[in-house]
């Protein structure tokens, strides 16, 4: 009986290296899949960050070049629905140009989105960038300073710059604070 146990243990030990090799190969396969998934996730994250940067840059550019002059030319100081649509379309087109045609196609292929779905994503990101740009406190102070400078040139009363800066959800339009 004692001989049988020693024989069984010797056979088990001889099979141990092959079991260890199988376990090691399975572990290396799992590690390879993990590294591939992480690299893909990092690539997608980098592409989405580049898209956000391109969209935010395009929205700021369109605001400076198109929106501010249209607001100044308007009697009410606001944009109409047609002007808003045109500004949004220009921002989307500028974002696509900043992102580049090849990168745009790569983004669609990486995310697995069709052209129409990618356009909807771009439109949503443009609207989010506009909303984010409206909510920046620096913009509130900048609008207040701009309004005070323009009203001082015309001889009007200066707006309450300190009051506008103390309310983070307010903006200055003309000489009035809007919340």
Image (cartoon, grey):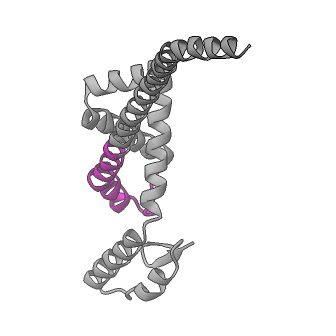
Q: Is residue 60 above or below residue 42?
A: below
The residue lying toward the viewer, choosing from 91 and 72, is 91
Q: Is residue 51 above or below residue 22?
A: below
Q: Main secondary structure of the magenta part?
A: helix
The residue lying toward the viewer, choosing from 134 and 79, is 134
Magenta stretch: give its range.
53-79
> Residue 154's quadrant in the figure?
bottom left
> Residue 32's quadrant in the figure?
top left
Q: Is residue 63 magenta?
A: yes
- Compared across the picture, whether 125 is left or right of 101 comes to right
Position in image of residue 173 (x %, y %) = 44, 70
The residue lying toward the viewer, choosing from 69 and 12, is 12
Position in image of residue 132 (x %, y %) = 46, 57
What residue is drawn where x is 48% and y is 86%? 163
- Compared across the picture, whether 119 is left or right of 4 comes to left
The residue lying toward the viewer, choosing from 149 and 132, is 132
Q: Is residue 41 above or below residue 132?
A: above
Q: Quadrant of the C terminus?
A: bottom right
Q: How many marks?
A: 0
Q: Is residue 119 above or below residue 169?
A: above
Position in image of residue 140 (x %, y %) = 41, 72
What residue is drawn where x is 51% and y is 75%? 168
Q: Quadrant of the N terminus?
A: top right
What residue is drawn where x is 38% and y is 88%? 157
Position in image of residue 150 (x %, y %) = 29, 77
Q: Is residue 1 magenta?
A: no
Looking at this rendering, what residue extends furthest in the right direction?
1
Looking at this rendering, what residue extends furthest in the front direction?
2
């Amino acid at each position: 009986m004692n001989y049988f146990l020693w024989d069984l243990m010797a056979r088990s030990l001889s099979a141990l290296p092959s079991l260890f090799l199988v376990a090691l190969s399975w572990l290396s396969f799992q590690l390879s899949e993990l590294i591939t998934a992480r690299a893909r996730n990092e690539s997608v994250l980098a592409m989405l960050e580049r898209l956000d940067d391109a969209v935010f840059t395009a929205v700021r550019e369109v605001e400076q070049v198109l929106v501010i002059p249209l607001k100044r030319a308007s009697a009410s100081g606001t944009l109409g629905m047609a002007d808003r649509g045109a500004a949004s379309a220009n921002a989307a087109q500028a974002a696509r140009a900043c992102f580049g045609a090849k990168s745009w196609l790569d983004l669609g292929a990486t995310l697995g989105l069709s052209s129409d779905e990618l356009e909807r994503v771009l439109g949503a990101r443009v609207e989010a960038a506009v909303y984010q740009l409206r909510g920046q406190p620096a913009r509130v102070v900048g609008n207040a300073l701009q309004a005070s400078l323009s009203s001082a040139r015309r001889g009007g009363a200066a707006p309450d710059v300190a009051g506008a800066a103390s309310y983070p959800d307010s903006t200055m339009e003309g000489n009035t604070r809007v919340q």
